[in-house]
Amino acid sequence: MTCKILRICLLFLGFQQCASQECVDPLVSSLYASSFLASSRYNFLYSANFAKLYGSSGWSPSPRDRQPWLQVDLGRKYRLMAIATQGTFNSYDWVSKYMLLYGDRPDSWTPYIMKGGNSTMPGNWNYYQVKRNVFHYSFTAKHIRLLPLAWNTENGGKVGVRLELFGCPYDDSVVYMYPEKRSRTLQDYITINFKTLEQDGLLLHSEGIQGDIFTLELKKGRLHLHISLGSSVLQKINGRTTLTAGSLLDNLHWHYVKIIRDGRQVNFTVDSQTVTAVCNGEFTHLDLDKQIYVGGVIEQNLPHLPLTPNFQGCLENVFINGINVIDKTKREETDIRIPRKMHFACRDILLKPMTFAGPNNFLQVPGFFRRPRMFVKFKFRSWDYTGLLMFTRFADDLGALELGLSEGQINFILNTFCIGIDFVFDDILFLKCSGYRLNDGYWHTVDLAARDNLLTLTIDEEEASPLKITNPFTIRTGDRYFFGGLNRFHGCMQHIFIDNEQLDIDIVLQRQWGRYAELLLGTCGITDRCTPNPCEHEGRCIQSWDDFICLCENTGYKGEVCHMSVYKESCEAYRLSGKYWSGNYTIDPDLSGPLKPFEVYCKMKSYKAWTVIMHDRVEGIKVTGSTIYQPYIADVNYWNASWDEVTALANTSMYCEQWIDYSCYKSRLLNTPNGRPFGYWIGRNNESHYYWGGTFREVQKCGCAINQTCIDPKFQCNCDADYRQWYSDKGYLDFRDHLPVRRVVVGDTNRTGSEAQVTVGPLRCHGDRNIWNTIAFVKPTYITFPTLRPGNTIDISFHFKTYREHCVFLENSDEHLKNFIRVELNTTHNLVFVFLVGDGILNVTLHSPVQLNDNEWHFVQAELNVKVARIKVDYQPWAVTRFPGQTFITMNFTFVFIEGASNRTLRPFLGCLRGLRINGVPLDLEGKVNEEQGVRRNCTGECLNASIPCRNSGQCIEGYASYTCDCNNTAFDGFYCHKDIGAYFEVGSWMRYNIRKKPISDEAAWANWIDPHYDNFSLGYNDTADDIEFSFSTVHKPAVLLYISSFVQDYIAIILKYDGSVDLRYKLGLITHKYQLTPRNLADGYPHYVNITRHNRTIKTQPIVEKITLVEDARFDSPKSMFLGRVMEVGDIDYEIQKHNAPGFIGCISGVRYNVYAPLKAMFRPNETNPPVMTQGYVSESNCGAFPPVLGYVPWEADPCFLHSCLNYFLKTLKYPFPVYFQTRLCCDFLFLLSVPINYNLPFCSLVFLVPKIL
């Protein structure tokens, strides 16, 4: 192998970063016709040289060409940034999908791989529009080849291509600063390009006398950067940091490396992959000696020299802080040491690999027939566990030989015949395995040699342990050899030798030798989908040719990429999920975030759950010999959890506390009142705190000072009295933002007899402040958070409740909405997760069987990764959209994250949100409260602060920006349930309302007896609670105002007696109970209000409020009918009822309601076809029995004054040219007059006449 070996020693110092210019020059439009080459052409008018963007024709191949391609020679190396394509001019010919290959030579290619490992690029959808694909990483090439994969076939369409490439010349010159004797840098900028066939090699190395290291080496086809800014043995600081990037870098194609360091921050980029890290330790400068080795080391006695061999391959554009190393080497400057003569040109080795890509791929090549010896040798690389590598059938029907992959090993199958003494042919099958983990993506060599009675198989040239078969068999080579094929081998092969003759790929490509199908010749298209590892939280990645899977066992996470935690975020979350027993639980405070789950003890209570974390200082520690200048520092190490994990728990809890106890014998603590503290504790963020348990934060006191129990009132702590007796200062630390305790410092135990003992209790927390972090949107508005940077996976969770039929919950996007995610309520039943993060706009829609705008809390979860997008609500199943293999997603958002509306403030959300998390991180919704903009704390809408509340027990229906009143269970009407519905009863008229048509069965009565529902009026039978209200006015007496019968002997009656007083009669069981509601004469012609409520055995009445206790049954069994005006019940009626029943009620009665039954409303405002109401005589609607109505403000959207039909009606009636303002005012005033009670007796014409006077 001919390679360039570069070993350079360089003295350097200085930093210069060159400003990059825009690299978007068109490269194809200026080329000559000779720069274009194609596999074929349709005719002269569709030649390859017509394939220029915006040209008058285009390139189309011959219809017989099974693998067409178009090739462009750029003349020199360019850095390529993008490609643009069109179809053939004025035709139906265009390419919808294609593959792009690039290289320095026209016979050695590298496929361009998009994010996600997909090599198929999207093309055009018509002939004239330009489809531009921007490469997600730039690359250098001299030759480009385009392979059409799919094209338009409608209307006789065929392959048609016009293209343009965008980039800039590949220039390796730069202005640089000359170095000095030593290197001490705060910033570094290093670039290097390389290509090699070797898996291992040292690219850069330098050391410093203070332990600083800088090493860039290639191991197993991956680049490793080792950097140390300094280590300290005394402080136990190991500054060495290792970053790893890239994969399969031994493919003899150019790879581009960039290293940027700013203090401890390091960015390491290899091709398209960037790894970021912060260097270990506390140093910021890189101090190196006077030389750095490029391509290998000359001396072999360096203390930190890596074991990696020197680099073998090609290097170019080696820049170290602005210094062009290659240029200095060419000029042989004095600060460059070269151990041997070098070649300043890269001598390529022509490998000519081939890619077995399709599902039916194969390669068939001829062999030498009937030879007694067989030699086959080839190299392959693959990710697949199984697949056929090689197959041949022997001549004279002597059997067959097969080599295949199985579970990462090579299976050797020899099926042959043996001729015995009696000339009987016996079928013999040999099955052997060789190798281990040969599906690791690296090149492996297979060397097979066979003759009669001996077969040798060698893997990776390990001649010391080949696989041998020495059984009797006969070899006569066949005339054909198959590679790939039957069992779907996917991978690459090269260096194929058959009977010591190397296979010429060029002859195969010209179809002059052998046959093939679904092969890419001249390139190896293998892609490492597990680098960088797409599996999160240390999940194990296993890949095949076109896909990968993540194994999440023992990680504590689940999902396609091990993103979602399998545990709850707190003990409170376990309690709310139904876990009511105390014990050890595993929690994950940041859920899908980077922190690991850990085990805690959950002490469950009925109303809250305590989280308890133990540590190693619970038993206390004895301290002596410490001073204020050399204090004793007691670190608190929490069990099963790191410091960050314990801090995350405290940060998400509602309340935390931790016991702390300082027991002292002549040992001062805070040195109060004004001295420098001898002891203190260190909490979150490494902050020191000078207050003790049982007191307030930052007051430098102990608990005894607050309770006024200190042994010496001159001091604020017991221990500060400095007595030769044992005392203690102790109490709970309960300021959550300072907890947990990380260290305790003791500094006054060095005097004679001084001694202290420190005890820190376990951290105890309860509640989860993220679950109830709630806001309400009461106006069409939105709140913003910083732009999301989720990477390749995002999960979203929140609770909501709303009444709106469609709204946007959240959105994040870029400026042009070319990259966005959105969660919205599309209809009352459809929850939609919409996103554009790769190939087009996609969505996942969950159809809920129940309405989601029912103003109840619903819990939403959504997740998006390279494998799947899904969404769920409450306990319903996930709605899932799975992506095909090789999918990539790009969530490069630039706008702020918006909550409550879309980016264009369309479809705003009105309702309540709580518990919002993005990738496990809670967002502080309450921190965005702004009453003026319509964002309120907690779930409080207009119902809580309604200017006019719903009246007469009407239920307020929250609209957040407004509200409505539900009057269905009342006897009233109107916007606020303020309008009475009454009736006027003439002599002899009456009304019956049927509650039930038949009595309740014994089984239902028994069921209701076992499980009674308080105030459950919808049952209509066996009630233990009654609610009766109405108003009336009359001058006639006596009368039965209201009578409620039952299918048994129970009844309720309200009687207006001869003297005008009102009595209540209850019969529940055998005894009738009589109660006087008022002794006054209510038959005075004025409205009077009656309200009676009963719960079990207690009755409250109005207008006189009193409590009356029943002594019998507390159930009103099976109510049957309600009577107004007169009792017309069939059967026995109590004598007192009959006595007051004639001639009946004469007058007005309004707002009659018994539990949920309103007979007058059912009569005059029916909501069903046949209401259960029957009347006799003249009963007319009237509100003469009601109190005067209270008119309130009506929202404009519900006000008929704003209806256009109202304006049109009055304008046509009045025929008067009023301005618009007066037109609206006119309509509203007119309708106001119409709402005046009817006893005004103003005729309609009079009202119309009054309108001009109002104006």
Image (cartoon, rainbow, N blue to C red):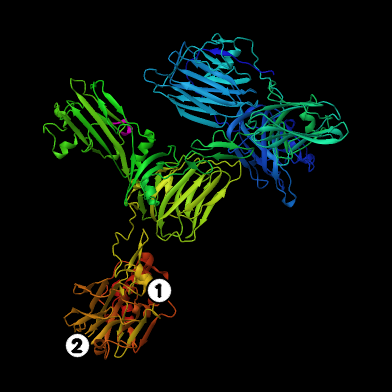
Q: Is residue 893 visible?
A: no
- Residue at 61%, 42% in the rendered image: 885
Q: Residues within 10 Å of mark 2 (few under 14, many from 20)?
A: some
Where is residue 862 drawn, in percent x and y? Answer: 48, 48
Q: In which quarter of the image is residue 1215?
A: bottom left
The answer to whether the residues at label 2 and label 1 have Cβ atoms under 8 Å apart is no
Among all residues in the image, which is located at the extreme top? 334
Q: In which quarter of the image is the N terminus?
A: top right
Give the magenta-colored segment's residue range: 683-688
Q: Earlier in the sequence, mark 2 or mark 1?
A: 1
Would residue 685 be counted in the magenta stretch?
yes
- How far apart in space, not on screen, are marks 2 and 1 (Cα)? 44 Å
Where is residue 1149 drawn, in percent x and y? Answer: 28, 81
Q: In which quarter of the image is residue 1017?
A: bottom left
Look at mark 1 in the image and give the residue it sits on: 1003
Where is residue 55 drawn, in percent x and y? Answer: 70, 40
Of the two numbered discs 2 and 1 in the rendering, the one whose residue sits closer to the viewer: 1
Q: In this view, does 1161 lie to the left or right of 155?
A: left
Q: How crowded is mark 1: few (under 14 residues within 10 Å), some or many (20 or more)?
A: few
Q: Is residue 587 left or right of residue 402?
A: left
Amino acid type at image mark 1: Glu
Q: Can residue 571 be seen in this view?
A: yes
Would residue 640 be counted in the magenta stretch?
no
Among all residues in the image, which is located at the extreme left? 713
Q: Above or below — where is 810 with respect to 136?
A: below
Q: In which quarter of the image is the C terminus?
A: bottom left
**Mark sitting on residue 1058:** 2
Relative depth, front residue between 1180 and 89: 1180
